[in-house]
Amino acid sequence: ELSFPPSQLPLRVGLAVSRAVGEAAGTEPAIRWPNDAMLAGRKVAGILCESRGELLLAGIGINCLQRSFPAEIADRAGSLLLATGRTVQPLALCPVVLARLHEALGDGTWRTEIERRLDGRGRRVRVEPIGSGMAVEGTMLGVDADGALLLRDDGGAIRRVAQGEISGSR
C-alpha cells in the first residue's frame, strides 16, 4: 500500500531513475517535469506511469549505449555513453535503479530534490496539458505536494498543471 497519493508516483519514479543515472554518469541529471532525466540538455531516460484498476505500473527506459539516434529525435535524445563517454551496461544499472526506487518511494523530501533538479525552473515555459487542448504558459515555479507543475502566468496568477508535456522553454 502506498504511503503517498498515486499522483506522486511519476515524479518519485523519475527521481529514482535520475539518482541512478547520476550514479552511473558521475553527474547529476536535471529532471524535466514530470520525470525525464536530462544530461547535457538531452533526454537520457523516460518513465511512463499508468494505473490499471488497483495496480500502478511504471515503465522505465534508460538510453545507455546508443551512439546515434534517428534524425527526427537526434537533437533532443541522448545516452549515458554520449553524455559522459562511459560505457554503462543496462543489466548493471538495473539493481541501482531498483535500490533508488525503493528509497524514493519512501522519501519524505522527494519534492525538495525534484525542485532542485527541475529543468526550466525560474524560466518561462509552455505546457500542453493532456486532454484539454489549451496550452498554458508562464514561469515555472516548482511542483505541488501532488506533483502538479506550478506556473505563474503573465497576470501573476498561479496555474496548476496536473498532467502535460512541456513543449518549450525560454
Image (cartoon, rainbow, N blue to C red):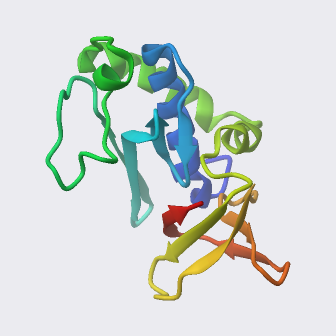
Residue 153 vertical placement versus 26 (above, below): below
Tell which residue pokes out farthest to the left in this image.
70
Q: Residue at x 60, y 33 (%)?
A: 104
Q: Quadrant of residue 122?
A: bottom right
Q: Residue at x 31, y 43 (%)?
A: 77
**In the displayed structure, does residue 62 sit left or right of residue 105?**
left
Q: Position of residue 19 (x, y in %)?
A: 54, 26
Residue 57 vertical placement versus 31 (above, below): below
In front of the other: 94 or 169? 169
Residue 113 vertical placement versus 142 (above, below): above
**In the displayed structure, does residue 118 sit left or right of residue 57?**
right
Q: Quadrant of residue 33?
A: bottom right
Q: Residue at x 83, y 80 (%)?
A: 157
Q: Position of residue 150 (x, y in %)?
A: 72, 65
Tell which residue pokes out farthest to the bottom in this image.
133
Q: Position of residue 130 (x, y in %)?
A: 46, 77
Q: Quadrant of the C terminus?
A: bottom right
**In the displayed structure, does residue 155 sit left or right of residue 3?**
right
**In the displayed structure, does residue 91 sit left or right of residue 95?**
left
- Residue 1, visible in the rendered structure: no
In front of the other: 58 or 124? 124
- Residue 87, visible in the rendered structure: yes
Label count reads 0
Q: Position of residue 57 (x, y in %)?
A: 38, 52
Q: Residue at x 18, y 27 (%)?
A: 67
Tell which residue pokes out farthest to the front in this image.
170
